[in-house]
Each structure stands twice: as C-alpha cells, then as structure tokens.
Image (cartoon, helix red, strand yellow):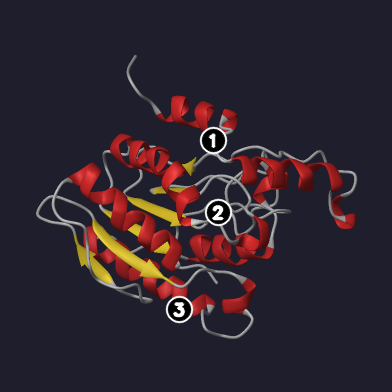
Amino acid sequence: MADSLERVRTEVVACTRCPRLVRYREAVARQKKREFRTDTYWGRGVPGFGDPAARLVVVGLAPAAHGSNRTGRMFTGDRSAAFLVRAFHAAGFASQPTSLRRGDGLHYTDLYLTAAVRCAPPDNRPTPAERADCAPFLARELSLLTNTRAILALGGFAWDALREVVPEVYGGHRPSTPFAHGTCVPLGEGRPLLWGSYHPSPQNTNTGRLTHAMLVDLLDRIRAGYAPARSPERRP
C-alpha cells in the first residue's frame, strides 16, 4: 500500500509505542485543567497539520498537555501556539492569527507543522528514546512532503531529531552544526535548507529571548532563501 500523509495521521493517532507517554496523555485527558473542565480532551497522538504542497516544514518539540493534547491539533490552544501562529499570520503563512481549536477556520498556505514527538510528555520533556520511537513518523512526513525547500526546527530537541532523520530522507551526512537561533545548514544540492529557531515557549517569549519580530524576520529570511521573487503582504 502506498504511503500517504493521511496514513501517517491515522497511525500517529492510534500509536501506543511509548508507555510513559500514553499513561501521561490519558491521565491528563481524564483529570483536565480547571480552565478546560468542560472540554473533551483529545488524549492521543497528535498528527501534523498544514499544506501538503508546503515548501516550509516547521518541526516543534511535542504537544502541550493542555494545548494540543486537549485540542488534537498541533500547536493549538496554548500560549506557545498563540505566539507561533500570530507570527505565521504576520509572515503570510496562516489564514488567521489565532489557533484555538480544531475547526476554527485556521489553515496554512505553503507551511506544514509537525513535531519530533507526537504525545504530550511529563514536564514537556520527552526522552531521546521517545524521540527515536517517533522518528519514523517524521521521516515519512518529510518523504511525502515533496515540495519542501526549508525545514525549521523549533528548539534544540527538534533540531537533534532532524539531524538524525534528514540523512535517511534526503541522503548525505548527518549535519554536525550545533543548534542556534537563525542557524542555516544546507543539506546538499537539490535538498532543503535546515534552519533553527528558539522554541516559542513562554520561557523564551516571556523573557524576550524570542520576540515576535525575531520570529517573523526569520520566517521572511527562510522564504527569501527559496522564493526570492515573492514579496508577501505583511501583517501586524
């Protein structure tokens, strides 16, 4: 059977490969947060979301316990999502500046959003072994997203996940460049560029380590690297 993004999605949602993550995601979905006590939590693996023809693939760390683990859509319903999607909208990738719930009208153009780990981890800290268990999903997505011209890792954990996966998908050597915000690593002729950004976590955005202007500027630089003729409409 030919692989497809829909097949990857189905397998991610049904995955029970990591017992610690399964226990945690389901416990959070039962206990809930007072603020969301009337919500029906997703409590499963969270698939990627976005434009199948995207030239930019953005890879985060993992679903947030009361964000994507609640809503069932990547980077939706928490503070990191609010920051990230506002920047996507300002850079012209998102149809609206908010990501609140599935079915809220949000769609991405030229961007596909996924993560290194697909289940919410305790303390937002998946293990390297859990990242390795999820790596085949990421590799398959990248293989199926055939228009990719750039891949953006949100944080060092996603950066390390991509360093392991990109040789399998695109060939060549494992990138050795350490993570830093704004880092760009060519993966070889005819292959995407690998970029790094600080993760849009409150720890980074509340302290000013990552600002809205910084992220929008980086998104503009990334697109300029593969589509220099385009001048997207800028939004506040």
* Residue ID for mark 3: 214
Q: Quadrant of residue 103?
A: top right
Q: Quarter of the image for the N terminus: give it.
A: top left
The amino acid marked with disc number 2 is Ala
* Label 1 packing within 10 angstroms: few (<14), some (14-19), many (20+): few
Give the structural element (helix, strand or loop) at label 2.
loop
In the rendered image of this protein, does residue 182 appear above or below residue 134? Answer: below
How many angstroms separate mark 1 from mark 2 (CA)?
Answer: 15 Å
Horizontal side of 155 relative to 170 (left or right) equals: right
Which residue does the image show at 61% across and 85% down from the upper left? 207
From the image, state whether disc 2 or disc 3 is nearer to you. 2
* Label 3 packing within 10 angstroms: few (<14), some (14-19), many (20+): some
How many angstroms separate mark 3 from mark 1 (CA)?
Answer: 37 Å
* Image coords of residue 29 (percent x, y): 78, 43
* Residue ID for mark 1: 17
How many angstroms separate mark 2 from mark 3 (CA)?
Answer: 22 Å
Horizontal side of 67 relative to 195 (left or right) equals: right
From the image, state whether disc 1 or disc 2 is nearer to you. 1
- Which sits earlier in the primary sequence, circle 1 or circle 2? 1
* Image coords of residue 219 (percent x, y): 39, 66
* Residue ID for mark 2: 62
The residue closer to the viewer here, 129 or 176, is 129
* Label 2 packing within 10 angstroms: few (<14), some (14-19), many (20+): many
Q: Quarter of the image for the C terminus: give it.
A: bottom right
The residue closer to the viewer here, 176 or 184, is 176
In the rendered image of this protein, does residue 185 appear above or below residue 67? Answer: below
